[in-house]
Image (cartoon, grey):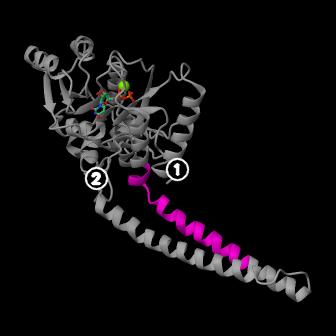
């Protein structure tokens, strides 16, 4: 995987229905703020909207303000999960329920400002299938946070997907086509960000300043964050399994070098410590061969793991055919043809379903 994919961008209208999926876990204090701000924003949108709030087994009083909201606003639905299943599962539950042509996933704590959705919709109308919010305001964060985030994204890109964008959370808009591809992936250990990068499609970003939490505390302490990173690394890549193979080769190589070294030294009559080389060589060869066998085993386990995820083998972004020729204006003779070609431009006269004008370069962004 390497170079960016060129995509056909086909401008389109606002979605017939926009679904906004909000995950909430113990957001009692934040929900009134969310209701006010999100309702006001949705009122300004030119397209019909549904708001799906996934209550991820909250144990505080989140349900009461949610019930009030759902009673007052017919656009709102609440999906109560049976217990706390975690953010990635809650988001999947909401995405499963979404009926819109475009779906936005956001947090309940207003760290993802709803107003950014308007910019996302503009990109959607340009033809992009995935529009993620890119966090711009790292300035206020500590050096440790910035350095660790930098290292985290590099590692994740190495392990998961080279197109995984940096400084991007789960706040994003996804088109129906991309969502259907995403929802076809039913793997147990989910890292949605990586899965969206994996499905492909034209992706772009809109910058935004990530606000501070409107109320309450983060539900993602360091331990949960590390667990998510671990899930991401392990469930996307068999690289860790291959490490033992590489280490085994290295150790066996050291053993062989030492064997050669010992033979050369004794032939040349250089001093050799009696017994040392044989012990080192045997230890390295045994250790190396055990690690190599584990690596081979890991390779098979990795393949079983890939197969068991049962991901789609490929995803078709678009299927382009020539448009119905009867839709072309009637042409009677050669002079008329050349006149029409001149008037329309060759590309238009050919009338492909997607014209050259809608082909944009480098629409899958690898991020910076
Ligand atoms: N969340 C959830 N289930 C969980 C943990 C978090 O649905 O088990 C929700 C939470 O209510 C919030 C979003 O996921 O809307 C992101 O969590 P949080 O704001 O705590 O994470 P942070 O922004 O601090 O990374
Ligand atoms: Mg948050």
**Image-quadrant location for residue 74:** top left
Q: Is residue 295 left or right of residue 80?
A: right
Please give the residue where the numbered disc 1 appears in the rendered image: 158
Q: Crowdedness of circle 1 by 10 Å Cα count: few (<14), some, many (20+)?
A: some
Q: Nearer the viewer, residue 339 or 274?
A: 274
Secondary structure under tag 2 reads loop
In the rendering, at what x and y percent does residue 169 appear? 40, 33
Above-or-below relation of 259 to 223: below
Please give the residue where the numbered disc 2 appears in the rendered image: 187
Q: Quadrant of ligand 2?
A: top left
Q: Main secondary structure of the magenta part?
A: helix
Q: Quadrant of the C terminus?
A: top right
**Which residues are drawn in magenta?**
233-257
Q: Earlier in the sequence, mark 2 or mark 1?
A: 1
In the rendering, at what x and y percent does residue 145 appear? 54, 30
Q: Nearer the viewer, residue 52 or 233?
A: 233
Q: Residue at x 21, y 24 (%)?
A: 60
Secondary structure under tag 1 reads helix
Q: Crowdedness of circle 2 by 10 Å Cα count: few (<14), some, many (20+)?
A: few
**Image-quadrant location for residue 96:** top left
Q: Is residue 162 left or right of residue 66?
A: right
């Amino acid at each position: 995987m390497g170079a960016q994919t060129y995509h056909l961008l086909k401008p389109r209208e606002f979605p017939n229905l926009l679904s906004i999926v909000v995950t909430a876990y113990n957001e009692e204090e934040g929900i009134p703020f969310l209701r006010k701000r999100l309702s006001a924003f949705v009122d300004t949108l030119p397209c019909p909207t549904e708001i799906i709030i996934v209550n991820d087994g909250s144990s505080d009083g989140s349900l009461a303000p949610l019930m009030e909201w759902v009673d007052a606003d017919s656009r709102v639905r609440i999906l109560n999960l049976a217990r706390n299943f975690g953010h990635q599962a809650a988001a999947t539950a909401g995405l499963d329920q979404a009926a819109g042509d475009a779906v936005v996933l956001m947090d309940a704590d207003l760290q993802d400002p709803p107003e950014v959705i308007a910019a996302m919709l503009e990109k959607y109308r340009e033809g992009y299938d995935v529009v993620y919010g890119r966090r711009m305001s790292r300035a206020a964060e500590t050096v440790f946070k910035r350095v660790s985030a930098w290292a985290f994204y590099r590692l994740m890109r190495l392990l998961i997907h080279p197109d995984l964008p940096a400084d991007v959370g789960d706040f994003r808009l996804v088109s129906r086509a991309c969502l259907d591809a995403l929802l076809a992936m039913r793997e147990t250990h989910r890292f949605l960000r990586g899965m969206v990068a994996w499905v492909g499609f034209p992706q772009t970003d809109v910058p935004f300043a990530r606000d501070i939490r409107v109320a309450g505390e983060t539900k993602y302490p360091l331990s949960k964050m590390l667990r998510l990173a671990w899930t991401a690394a392990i469930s996307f890549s068999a690289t860790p399994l291959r490490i033992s193979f590489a280490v085994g080769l290295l150790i066996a190589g050291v053993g062989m070098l030492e064997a050669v070294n010992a033979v050369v030294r004794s032939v040349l009559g250089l001093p050799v410590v009696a017994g040392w080389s044989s012990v080192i060589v045997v230890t390295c060869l045994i250790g190396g061969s055990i690690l190599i066998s584990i690596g081979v085993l890991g390779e098979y386990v990795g393949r079983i793991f890939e197969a068991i995820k049962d991901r789609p083998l490929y995803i078709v972004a678009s299927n382009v055919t020539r448009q119905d020729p009867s839709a072309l204006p009637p042409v009677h003779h050669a002079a008329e043809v050349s006149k029409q070609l001149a008037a329309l431009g060759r590309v238009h006269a050919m009338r492909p379903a997607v014209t050259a004008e809608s082909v944009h370069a480098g629409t899958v962004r690898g991020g910076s």
